[in-house]
Image (cartoon, rainbow, N blue to C red):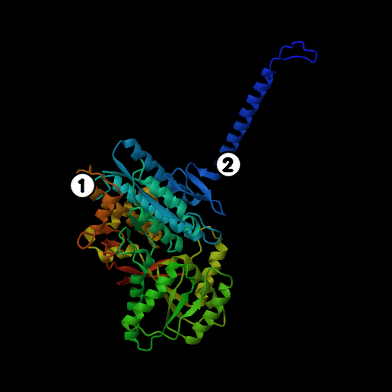
Amino acid sequence: MSSDDGTFVPPRPPRRKAPWIIAGAVVLAAAVWGGAEAYRAWQHEKAECAPGILRKGAREECIGVSDGSFAFDPSLKEVMGKIEAENERVEESGKQFVSVAYIEPLTTVKGEEEAKYGLRGELMGAYLAQRELNDPDLGAGRGDLPQVRLLVGNLGLRSEQWRTLTGDLVAMAKDDNHLVAVAGFGQSRGGTKNAVDALRDAGIPMMGATVTADSLSDAARPGFFRTSAPNRDQAVGAVNYLRAQQKKDPGFKVAVIRDRNEDDIYNTSMSTAFATAAAGRGLEIEGTPLEFLSGVDGVSNAFSSVADKVCDLRPDAVFFAGRGVNIRNFIYSMSAPDRRCPVTLITGDDAVGAYYGSLESEARREKFRTEWTDSRVTVLYSSLAHPALAGRLYAEANNPLPDFLGLYRTEFGGAPDETMQVLQDGQVIMGHDAVWTLGIAIRNAAGPDGKGQVNTGATLQMLLQLSGRASVSGLSGPISFAPDGNPDRKPMALVRMEPSGVYTFRGVLTP
């Protein structure tokens, strides 16, 4: 390089950044990266209720699958703790095991707490079935291999978070959780059907416990079974009962009240099944159905009008195609001093939702009991299970209920009469029978030595074999399956619900 006068000027060496500047930049970059990682970790922790259980939806519900270590709700803490302890024992035993998931809508909103306590009963029954399957001294000669881990999953309020949960379950069927079947499913809603369809597509066999909508079954696509009588059978049982009353008394009048909420597949299938059965068996119905629409404002006003119409018609009985919570609306409306016309309401298994749950104030529950008595409404329903039913369906020597009562009291305490009262609503019994029946299929798939490979396909194959004479001795009665996965002509209990909260067994209903 030359200057203006031609003198050579050596080029300047390139400027070097000071080491402290470089070090500072490195430190700053690390701090930014570390801060971003810390923020991501904070966000992840904020999004999780527990490892693998995420906050989902506008209500930030805890959605996912728990081995019992996360209880989902304080009301479930005791039974989830027992499930966790049994799962730990299974894993520490070193024996071959498979997993069964019990899924339900485990979160509720204010005013629906009674559903939560019904779910607790189902989980208690599911846990007791797990104990019977894993302990050869309790399992009625069914062996103890493979051992059964019981997982619990939350579908979200009204089963709205079904997509996230079913995704988790499908993954668990492919990893070291060895998931081979799913039980439970809660209420018959649109989200429930979506969950069933997703699991059926994934080849995972299912066992409904208290879910009853007819549209869940599909003989052409096996995979969904249930120990609960579907709405079709419940409606036929109700029609048979009412038709018998009309034969005894030709003047016996029957009316119908139905919910027009099409999203609730329990209501719609109950209404359709009853209309079909009534037409086929010659049951005479007074006029057109009296209607209301759940899930929108003004339900109480609608029931005020429905109650007036009932008192104008003066039927001896009404068939109610709706949820238990709406039976409560009807009772309140019928308790008005200018109504109080005597009527018998007969309905399906969701009637248990009419009672206020244990979290409701005693003053409110006492008010409802008083209003119910004043209303002169008698409530009968087709119960999926009742402790008195087994004694009517089994010979004394073959009745599985007495041994179960002993196990129940060992695990959860209580005097014999208290235990019978707890079992009256059928929730514990149905939770037990769903897991117990899956367990029998699992053991059959494992073979006499218990060493056969058990996966979703093998479990499904053995469930298909539980038909005809190859029935399972359930607490709710013998269980065998028709080609569509429904229990084959399984009897039900006709139960009267008392304002005091007692469920009185009235007889056996047959479909």
Residue under numbered circle 1: 447
Q: Which image quarter is the N terminus in?
A: top right
Q: Is residue 154 above or below residue 233?
A: above
Residue at the spot 52% in from the left edge and 73% down from the top edge: 293
**Place of residue 422 in the rendered image (x, y in percent of width and height, measured from the top left):** 40, 58
Residue at the spot 34% in from the left edge and 57% down from the top edge: 207
**Place of residue 115 in the rendered image (x, y in percent of width and height, measured from the top left):** 47, 60
**Place of residue 121 in the rendered image (x, y in percent of width and height, measured from the top left):** 41, 56
Q: Which image quarter is the C terminus in?
A: bottom left
- In the rendering, which numbered label is found on residue 104? none
User: In which image quadrant can residue 237 be found?
Assistant: bottom left
Element type at marker 2? Answer: helix
Identify the amino acid type marked 2.
Gln
| Front in this rendered view, residue 332 or 46 | 46
Task: Work out how far the residue at label 2 is from the one at label 1, CA to CA, in angstroms.
Answer: 48 Å
Q: Residue placed farthest to the bottom in the image?
A: 251
Tell me which label, 2 or 1, sits earlier in the chain.
2
User: In which image quadrant can residue 494 be found?
Assistant: bottom left
Residue at the spot 63% in from the left edge and 32% down from the top edge: 32
Residue under numbered circle 2: 43
Q: In this view, does 368 lie to the left or right of 149?
A: right
- Given this view, does label 2 or label 1 mark the residue nearer the observer? 2
